[in-house]
Amino acid sequence: MIRHNMKTLRFIGAEAFIANQEYAKGHIRSVAHNLYPLLLKACYLHEKEELITMLLENWPQQDFNFGKLLGKTLDYPEDISHWACRRSLSACLKGLKNYVVNPSTTYSKRLKVVDLTAIQDIEFQPCRCKKSLGRWARTEMISQLCFELLLEMQKLDSGPSIFDIDIDICFNLFVTEKNYELVVQALLMRCHCPLKIRCVDFRADNLALRKLFYILRLVEPNSIHKLEIVHNVRLESYHLEVLLNNLGFLQLTSLTLPARTFNVTHHTPEDDALLSTIGEKLSNMVHLTELSISFSTLTGRLRKLLSPLKTPLKVLELGYCSLNQIDMAYLANSLHAEHLEVLDLSGHNITELFPSTFFKLLQKASSTLKTLVLEECDIGDMNIHVMEMGLVHCLKLKEFKFLQNPVTSISVRRIFRVLVNLPMLKYVEFPVPKDCYPPDVNYPLDEATLVKFDNQKYNMVKESVQCILVQAAREDISAVTPLFGSYDSAIEETSKELGVGLLTSFKDALQSFTTSLQKL
């Protein structure tokens, strides 16, 4: 065996075999079945589309697990399972369709499960074509594939054996208004199609509630692991209760709800009872460990929602939830505090309004906390010491994000002198310091002001931060300032549709407001 970070002779041999594509196409059916996984990884690495299609068309094994086949292997240790390469993935799906349609004279068809859940959508694709097939596009393409396969089966003079093929395609669906009809069509015809869509994670955006409820019924909600209902879905607390009353999510581990799902500003006793009921419903999801409810107003009511949960949360996103001292005190003393791995408290003035409870929360979470997000928390030079005292205990921390806080260059350097002592830390998002902006700016900064800073001053700060990292031998820490936040592949992929949806929503709201004025 060659060094672990290098290819083995077997993999080099596979690369040599596929180098001449015409030769490989003529002999690929003669290759031993146990070499198919090796050849697939080599073909995917080099984007040999025709060979990928042929390999899938003749796949001899019972399962095709994307993560295992293209992940770290002895023959080639690099993990390429996260490559969402458009050309190679399209070739895989084409081969899968051919596998069903084309008769096999040399072997019986054994394939039962195709697992595509390991594919990740990242900002810069490492593949040669540099073009990705995102989650939304994969949802559309697989749905289209299932529908076309049914039409083709009707035209073909195929024997009954083709109807005996049952292959589960496990993948993560992303449904919006634009691809809704096609996905529903594929799900409704699932019992007749040899390729059966099995949803593992489900994301919905820009979708009417009646359509959301209907499609969730179709995707077998009891098997969903992660449910994301985001952005332009007008889900409110009473809608959520209806959803949870009618559908079971027995395997759900992660739940994300859209902005303003909860709003306790004008709550009545009946609304408080509703919040408790939703908490009880969530407690029935015994596997639930991740909850994101950012941009909901939960002032003084966090306990009602979270205290019924019997399983401790590992991921809790409470950004911009207008939490108060009561909420923070509950959180610091809750069963969740000692299990948190990801915590987002963005939009709360934690260091000034409740420094002691925040400090206690970080102490409780210090043995597990891996990611801490404190964006727009009004952390300035006067209270930076609270941050320092809290962070020093978080020895498991891997990511820390504190963008859009009014700290000066001096405080940025102070924070990094603390951060370099956290052994697991790998990634930091820090703000453009306040002294790089004109003196009359107000926080939080709007998008127009955000970009109007002194680049020369900022570069000097970044250089000083880099010096601190070098002096502490912590060049392994990546320190960046993404002005408009981290990359979001889902928003990037569907931004045009979401933009139109938001404009339509704004137009409807404006029309409703105008109608109300006319009635006065």
Image: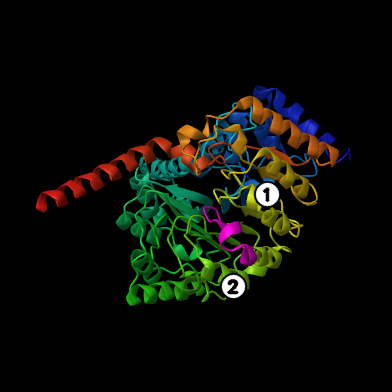
Label 1 vs 2, first from the N-terminus: 2
| Image quadrant in which you'd find residue 265 | bottom left
User: Which residue: 57% across, 76% down?
Assistant: 310
Q: Quadrant of the N terminus?
A: top right
**Could you tell whether 193 is left or right of 389 in the image?**
left
Mark carried by residue 477: none
Q: Which residues are magenta?
A: 345-358
Residue type, label 2: Thr
Q: Does the image show residue 501?
A: yes
The answer to which of 218 and 258 lies nearer the viewer is 258
Mark 1: which secondary structure? strand
Q: Which residue is mark 2?
A: 311
**Could you tell whether 271 is left or right of 290 in the image?**
left
Q: How is the image coloured?
A: rainbow
Q: Which residue is mark 1?
A: 399
Vertical placement of 211 versus 427: above or below? below
Vertical placement of 37 versus 63: above or below? above
User: Which residue: 66% across, 24% down?
Assistant: 21
What is the distance, in whole Å, between disc 1 and disc 2 at their CAs?
24 Å
Residue type, label 1: Glu
The answer to which of 41 and 58 lies nearer the viewer is 41
Please provide percent x and percent y for residue 519.
10, 53
The reply to whether dot 1 and dot 2 touch (C-beta < 8 Å) is no
Please provide percent x and percent y for residue 104.
56, 42
Mark 2: which secondary structure? loop
